[in-house]
Amino acid sequence: MSLPGEFALIARHFRKLAGPGALDLADDAALLDPPPGQQLVLAADAMVAGVHFLAEDPPETIGRKLLRVNLSDLAAMGAAPLGYLMTTALPAGTSEAWLAGFVAGLAADQAEFGLSVLGGDTVSIPGPISLSLTILGHVAPGAALRRAGARPGDEIWVSGSIGDGALGLRVLQGRLPADAAGHLAGRYRVPQPRLALGQALSGLARAAMDVSDGLVQDLGHLCRAGGCGAVLRADAVPLSPPAAALLAGDPALLPLVLGGGDDYELLFAAPPGQGAEVEARAAAAGVAVTRIGEFVEGPAEVRVLDAAGAPLALPRLGWSHF
């Protein structure tokens, strides 16, 4: 007897992603044994064509981005990955080639980050493509990084570079020059979850989160969770060479860099005087970090200053789905 269409699709494409706990994707649920003495960490993110990725993006990069934005949530908690559940809602007639590319991207990142699919669901919809992934990770009890915890006097640090994702989207949309399309588009399509850095910061960072909706807006989340304000020095925000070149040619792009989102870098608070330790741990994790400001007494809001110390008024603080 042949398999019904949904199960045949799972057998052709998704079964190759399954690990031992997935039971060959043949049961109603997975079985998972977390490492002894560890807490489970769970997070979920959804991606919709035309909102979180471009419909014409290569399917390999769509699969990788779906997994990596969820891995970034684990990084922000200082957790290590275990596995994931995934739901794919695909328009009728989605091609075998698209599915094969999507799965190939997931398989490549499963191998890179050491996890596998545990199960999920596949449904057909009129469109557009809608994808949801629930990530499972683990962390030692009491070691998880949290958003709450920043104190006045703490230093604000960020990993990597800021603005590439938002600029990359504009390049792909044809709204910015394409001189640096390769780097910027790659940063938009395939973000880099800072898992090693998140784990290295355990016991040092007082608060942390990943930058997904814009640096200024996400810093505001840390302020509200910590009950303090923040001063952000715009000239200290780290930029990649392509982003710096675009900004030099058009300073009006600064609000996009600071509030565009899709960076998936780690933003964290560290106690004052611990800069050398922060940099040492980041170097051991293979990630550059930059101090960009400090938390201060006062209302839970972010003040952005220019190179001369004057306040900058930004028309938009970050991305919102609503």
Image: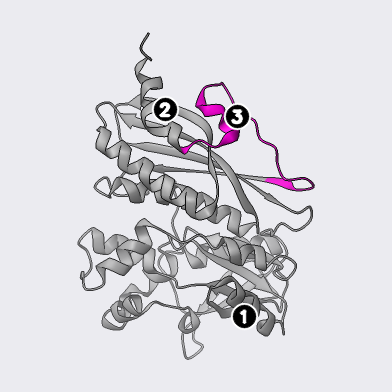
Amino acid type for the residue under numbered disc 3: Ala
Q: Is residue 120 left or right of residue 139?
A: left
Q: Which residue is mark 2?
A: 122
Asked if residue 134 lies in the magenta stretch, the reply is no
How far apart marks 3 and 1 lie (CA) works out to 40 Å
How far apart marks 2 and 3 lie (CA) works out to 16 Å
Q: Which residue is mark 1?
A: 279
Amino acid type for the residue under numbered disc 1: Glu
| Type of secondary structure dominating the magenta stretch | loop
**Image vertical order of residue 272 relative to residue 48, above or below:** below
Q: Quadrant of residue 106?
A: top left
Q: Which residues are magenta?
A: 17-40
| N-terminal label among 3 and 1 | 3
- Residue 284 point in image, percent of width and height: 61, 75
- Residue 312 point in image, percent of width and height: 45, 78
Mark 2 touching mark 3, by CB under 8 A? no
Disc 3 residue crowd, few under 14, some 14–19, many 20+, Cα 10 Å: some
Disc 1 residue crowd, few under 14, some 14–19, many 20+, Cα 10 Å: some
Amino acid type for the residue under numbered disc 2: Thr
Q: Is residue 141 left or right of residue 70?
A: right
Asked if residue 38 lies in the magenta stretch, the reply is yes
- Residue 115 point in image, percent of width and height: 55, 46
Q: Secondary structure at mark 1?
A: helix
Q: Quadrant of residue 295?
A: bottom right
Q: Secondary structure at mark 2?
A: strand
Residue occupying the point 33% across, 26% down: 125
Q: Which residue is mark 3?
A: 30
